[in-house]
Amino acid sequence: MTDDPDESAATDNDDTATEENEAEESAGPTPVGVKLGSTRTVLQYVRGGEVETVRTLTCLATYEDPLTGDEQVLFGEQAAQEYPDTVKYMLRSGLPQDDESADLAAKFFEEVVSAEGLDEDSAVVYAIPTIDNEPGLRNLNRVIEQSSVGDALVRSFPESLCGSIPAFGDDLEAIDEVFAAVNMGSTNLEASAYRHGEQLSPFVSGAVTGNEVDRKIANAVEEETQGRVNIDLTTAREYKETHADFDAFEPFTDVIQQPGGGAHEFTIERSVMEPLDDYVDDAVDEVANNFLSQLANDHMKPYQLALSKPIVLTGGMACIPGIVDVFEDRLSAELDRDVTCIAADRPDLAPAEGARRIAERLIE
């Protein structure tokens, strides 16, 4: 026993720290959901009972420290802003295509993990694309294996399944359903049916992509401004993400600096929504006439059940306001029957959220 207040306070602090450590240990491994995307990567994990979400550009840049000569690494928005000419997007095609891309992806992911302070004793579930690319999937597996997280557990599930989980409810109701999902991503249009988590008739098309929409927007801006304005694909994507709206699109103005000096202000009225309108038509055509016909041929009963349930739209393109209702209307017209489409509140975050929920269940 002691009357020293400082010693007593120190003892109290030690007890508190011990209790916190014991609480963390009793909580078990940290559940982590990961979506390594071609444009953006999303992590979602639980820390101190709170869900944390990280969304960053999938890119990195390196530079030499002027004092030590050591290589320094930046990632995400900071890398894109400070080193726009040398920043590297290593997953532009959706997967690491070669050893160099895999090494860069591993370095990028490790920087993200380190910045978040994620511990090794974590249960990590990856939402991966449905794609027929064995070398790319092997390279992605290399990235996962090299990661410092996931000592407790590492699993992977289809991105469209993970992205559908938040659309169905607050738990894992999607795992108990028979339904179809359409992943509207930057590099591919993917579609799959799911029967209690089992993937049926996976379909992939590289002809209808968010990246192609960006290219069409850039070309349309040049045409609408009669050749006076040329924008890069990054700006085109920003126009799409900021201004596209099937419910209430409004023309907007922007300003560019002229090569000879001065500024040129211009207004965009058609160049964003016309390419997106074509995108929805093309996506509906692929889903109705390729994916669903294939599903009907392969699995007639699940096909019938899936069309009686909501079709889930996932992926970054599903974030555009009004696109879910437009897709539903046009797919219903194409199939000549009423179908319902739904999406999570944040389709861009949904795959990581669904993966994190699966990780929590697997820990249990």
Image: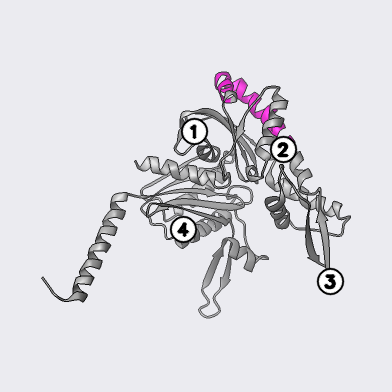
Q: Are marks 3 and 4 in contact (CB under 8 Å)?
A: no
Which residue is labeled 2 in the image?
280
Gap between marks 1 and 4 measured at Cα: 28 Å
Query: Which residue bears the numbered disc 4?
Result: 113
Give the CA separation, mark 4 to mark 2.
36 Å
Q: CA distance from mark 1 to mark 2?
A: 25 Å
The disc label shown at residue 160, or none = none
**Earlier sequence position, callout 1 versus callout 4:** 4
Kindly identify the amino acid type of the residue bearing the numbered disc 2. Answer: Val
Query: Label 3 is placed on what type of residue?
Result: Gly
Label 3 residue SS: loop
CB under 8 Å between discs 4 and 2: no
Residue to which mark 1 is pinned: 174
State the SS at label 4: helix
Residue 291 part of the magenta-drawn span: yes
Residues in magenta? Answer: 281-306
Q: Is residue 17 left or right of residue 275?
A: left
**Sequence-first disc among 3 and 4:** 4
Q: Amino acid at mark 4?
A: Val
The vertical placement of 145 against 337, above or below, is: below
Give, as a three-letter code, the residue at label 1. Answer: Ala
Q: Position of residue 20 (x, y in %)?
A: 29, 58
Q: Please, which residue is most extreme toward the top here?
A: 301
